Image (spheres, rainbow, N blue to C red):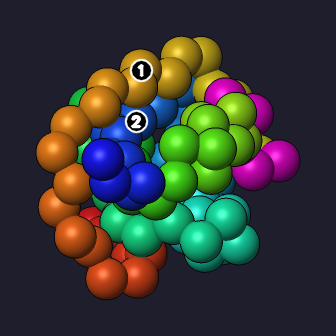
Amino acid sequence: MSQFHHRTFHVHGRVQGVFFRQSTQHEARRLGLSGYARNNEDGTVTIEAEGPAEALDALEAWCRQGPPLAHVEKVEATSGPVQGFDGFDVRR
């Protein structure tokens, strides 16, 4: 059983134009996670993250608050197969 897990977070609310992706990158790197954060056309942010379950739980908790200028309304989290990301990136 792999100790690495994969989760996808869809973050809804005022989450674009408030440094959400960059702040997520900082928090994910602090937690030792790999993956990426990207904006979606519908105004949400998608985060793909991999690492230990405890670190993913911590990132999910952080996403529910977000950076100071964000207003998070909802976070949807799903699990999936590990992709093997290298580092944590901000994507457009």
Disc 1 residue crowd, few under 14, some 14–19, many 20+, Cα 10 Å: few
Amino acid of disc 2: Phe
Q: Earlier in the sequence, mark 2 or mark 1?
A: 2
Q: Is residue 24 above or below residue 85?
A: above
Q: Is residue 71 above or below residue 58?
A: above
Q: Nearer the viewer, residue 77 or 39?
A: 77
Residue drawn at the location 51% of the way across and 66% of the way down: 33
Label the magenta part by its dominant secondary structure: loop
Residue drawn at the location 41% of the way across and 20% of the way down: 76
- Residue 77 percent location from the top left of the image: 40, 25
Asked if the stretch drawn in magenta spans residue 24, the answer is no
- Residue 23 percent location from the top left of the image: 65, 64
Whole-angstrom CA distance, mark 2 to mark 1, is 5 Å
Which residue is labeled 1 in the image?
76
Q: Magenta segment, which residues?
A: 64-68
Q: Is residue 21 above or below residue 43?
A: below
- Residue 2 percent location from the top left of the image: 32, 54
Residue drawn at the location 17% of the way across and 61% of the way down: 83
Residue drawn at the location 75% of the way across and 50% of the way down: 67
Left or right of 77, for residue 41: left
Q: Nearer the viewer, residue 18 or 85?
A: 85
Which residue is labeled 2 in the image?
9
Quadrant including the C terminus: bottom left
